[in-house]
Image (cartoon, rainbow, N blue to C red):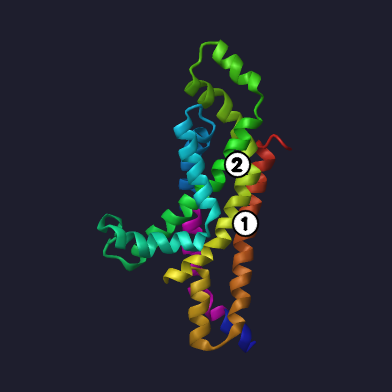
């Protein structure tokens, strides 16, 4: 009973960390998806310089560790130029904004490959038919190809969202209090490893909720079901 009471007493701190984890994931994946659409279109572009630029971006962010990217954006960029120094007067935002930027840039690289594959999975005849009807390249993509590709994106985007949700624990390395950081703070003050239990349960609950949401979306819109 005493152990259960102790775990319950840790709930406010862990739930506060959960808000940071969820907020970071929602913002970074949403921004990443928007950026990834342009990257995907750029990678399949007929313009070689656009193709190479987008391919280089994707290669860099997929080929380097997310933690290293986070450290670079948070620690190194402000040293390179004061322009990159984020000072809001709020210590939380000073850490949260670089974290969102790092996660969004990383997520964009992975989502770009997902979107590119989805776009290229659409029958080429539909694009050719759109062009034959007088639609420009941009209108054919935005009105015909991309809307169909979106329905194929739900399962892999859902997986990417869950991955970012779990990777959000990395922000504890820059002293941003997410679930993992809150757990470490509790452990250091109480010397009790039992805090791992409610922390893992909280991660499982959050993951289960978003998995359920994406499953419902997939069931409603995906072409695979």
| Residue closer to the observer: 219 or 88 | 88
Q: Which residue is mark 2?
A: 114
Q: Is 13 in the magenta?
A: yes
What residue do we see at 61% from left, 29% from top? 148
Vertical placement of residue 63 versus 10, above or below: above
Tell which tag, 2 or 1, sits nearer the viewer: 2
Range shown magenta: 8-26
Snapshot quadrant of residue 204: bottom right
Residue lying farthest top?
133
Residue lying farthest right?
225
Q: Which residue is mark 1?
A: 209
Q: Quick one: quadrant of the N terminus?
A: bottom right
Disc 2 element: helix
Q: Quick one: quadrant of the C terminus?
A: top right
Residue 177 in sight from this viewpoint = no
What residue do we see at 65% from left, 28% from top? 122
Q: Position of residue 201 (x, y in %)?
A: 63, 70
Q: CA distance from mark 2 to mark 1?
A: 23 Å
Q: Earlier in the sequence, mark 2 or mark 1?
A: 2
| Residue closer to the observer: 200 or 57 | 57
Residue 219 in sight from this viewpoint = yes
Snapshot quadrant of residue 221: top right
| Residue closer to the observer: 12 or 75 | 75
- Magenta region's main secondary structure? helix
Disc 1 element: helix
Q: Position of residue 202 (x, y in %)?
A: 59, 68
Q: Position of residue 21 (x, y in %)?
A: 50, 62
For label 2, count other residues whose C-alpha is less than 10 Å away and answer few (under 14), some (14-19) or many (20+).
many
């Amino acid at each position: 009973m005493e152990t259960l009471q102790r775990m319950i007493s840790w709930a406010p701190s862990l739930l506060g960390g959960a808000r940071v984890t969820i907020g970071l994931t929602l913002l970074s994946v949403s921004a990443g998806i928007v950026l990834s659409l342009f990257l995907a279109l750029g990678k399949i572009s007929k313009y070689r310089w656009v193709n190479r630029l987008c391919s280089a971006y994707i290669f860099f962010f997929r080929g380097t560790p997310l933690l290293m990217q986070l450290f670079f954006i948070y620690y190194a960029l402000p040293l390179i130029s004061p322009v990159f120094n984020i000072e809001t007067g709020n210590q939380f935002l000073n850490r949260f904004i670089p974290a969102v930027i790092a996660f969004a840039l990383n997520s964009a690289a992975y989502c770009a490959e997902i979107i590119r594959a989805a776009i290229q999975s659409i029958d080429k005849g539909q694009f050719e038919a759109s062009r034959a009807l007088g639609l420009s390249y941009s209108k054919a993509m935005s009105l015909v190809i991309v809307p169909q590709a979106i329905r194929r994106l739900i399962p892999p985007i859902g997986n990417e969202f869950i991955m970012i949700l779990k990777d959000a624990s990395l922000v504890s390395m820059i002293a941003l209090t997410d679930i993992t950081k809150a757990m470490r703070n509790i452990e250091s003050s109480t010397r009790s490893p039992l805090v791992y239990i409610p922390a893992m349960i909280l991660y499982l609950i959050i993951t289960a909720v978003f998995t359920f949401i994406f499953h419902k979306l997939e069931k409603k819109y995906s072409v695979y079901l």
